[in-house]
Amino acid sequence: MLIMQQIWMLSATQALCMSGSFLFVLLGGIIGSQLAPAPGLATLPVSLMIVGLAASVLPAGMLIRRRGRRTAFVLGALLAGFGCAIAGLGIHAANFWIFCAGALLLGANNAMVMQYRFAAVEYVTPARASKAIGIVMSGALAAAWLGPEIAVRSADLVLALTPVAAGTADKDTRAPRPLLEIAAQADFRVAVLAALVSYAVMSFIMTATPISMHIIDLHDEVATKRVIQGHLLAMYLPSLASGWIIARFGIRPIIAAGTLLMASCVAIAAFAGHEVLHYGWALVLLGVGWNLLFIAGTTLLTKTYRPQERVQVQTLNDFMVFGSQAVASLMAGVALTTIGWQRLNLATLPLLAAVLLSLALAARRRQAQQT
């Protein structure tokens, strides 16, 4: 009972900390288009929030190793509060670069927030890892509707009350393996690629969507908001069941299913049309596919390292995943203005194909080892 309370505490904290980020995803590009000195820079604030995440992954990992997760999480909440305040100052002063600076700080907090799923795993047995991850990720459902004011005022208080996980590192006395040896595992490569592609493709398409809908296709703010909110719900609502689904059907089939759902998003976005309904269905499929692909990939990652290796491996994983997301987000605005919405979506297909190929190669390798 106490363990579940601790996991749900992390879920509630996730909801508080991510509410400001979700609001920024919805409005960052639109505000950027009004403040930016050039149209191609409109999505830069959203991209810089992701850059802030990627740039903070390694420092977050070092802080966790030296001071523990609680200290890192509280510091992240404080950074989020400062980031929201600075972004608000940028809007008030109509200063694009101040607004961007706030986005960077908000992104730095997200590097801490992304560690919540790994913190939850430390409370449970390996067989229940996917369920613990799903519960924590489901906290973002509330974040899709909560305002940043609640997050700034309350997140640091809840984080300070978050209990410290007991951990399992002392149960394995073997020396940690070199990261290159861990990374040589086929399952490690599949896990990282699944999470990397889920975030890169999702961010690439999602970042461009408000600009494509509101600025290019002239859909109103209400329609754009509903599409993004639907996308956010689709990203996190499945978390209530995805842990059970992964446990029932297996990690690798769910990785394949998530990849195919994201490919379905690309098909609708590229060929169905530019009406609100088309954007809506595409973004819902994108969200559900992201959820399955990311949670299954994270679950698989937890099976590739020993307890004493967890912080180093988790940090390396998140650096690669969110670094790729930052690159994808930075490219989204330029891609939208140069190659257009259809080709922007089609450009993601090679990444999705790479996930399916990695699954096939890993399965072939396992079969060869068994014969």
Image (cartoon, helix red, strand yellow):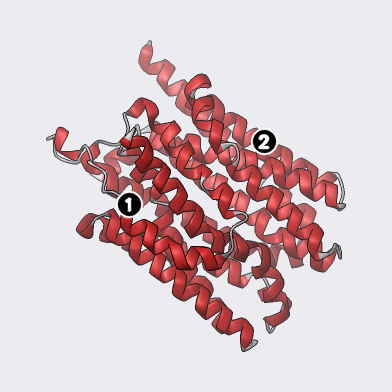
Q: Could you tell whether 173 is left or right of 76 in the image?
A: left
Mark found first going from the N terminus, 2 or 1: 1
Indicate the quadrant where residue 293 lies: top right
Residue identifier under label 2: 261
Relative to residue 74, is residue 99 drawn left or right?
Answer: right
The correct choice, above or below, for 205 with respect to 218 in the image is above
Q: Position of residue 58 (x, y in %)?
A: 34, 60
Mark 2: amino acid: Leu
Q: Nearer the viewer, residue 185 or 310?
A: 310
- The image quadrant of residue 160 is bottom left
**Left or right: 266 with respect to 173?**
right
Residue type beneath disc 1: Thr
Residue 26 screen position, x and y as percent:
67, 62
Image quarter where the C terminus lies is top left
Label 2's element? helix
Residue 355 position within the rendered picture, expressed as x and y whole percent measured from the top left: 55, 37
User: Is the Cβ of the residue at disc 2 closer than 8 Å to that at disc 1?
Assistant: no
Which residue is label 1 attached to?
Answer: 162
Q: Residue at x 34, y 52 (%)?
A: 315
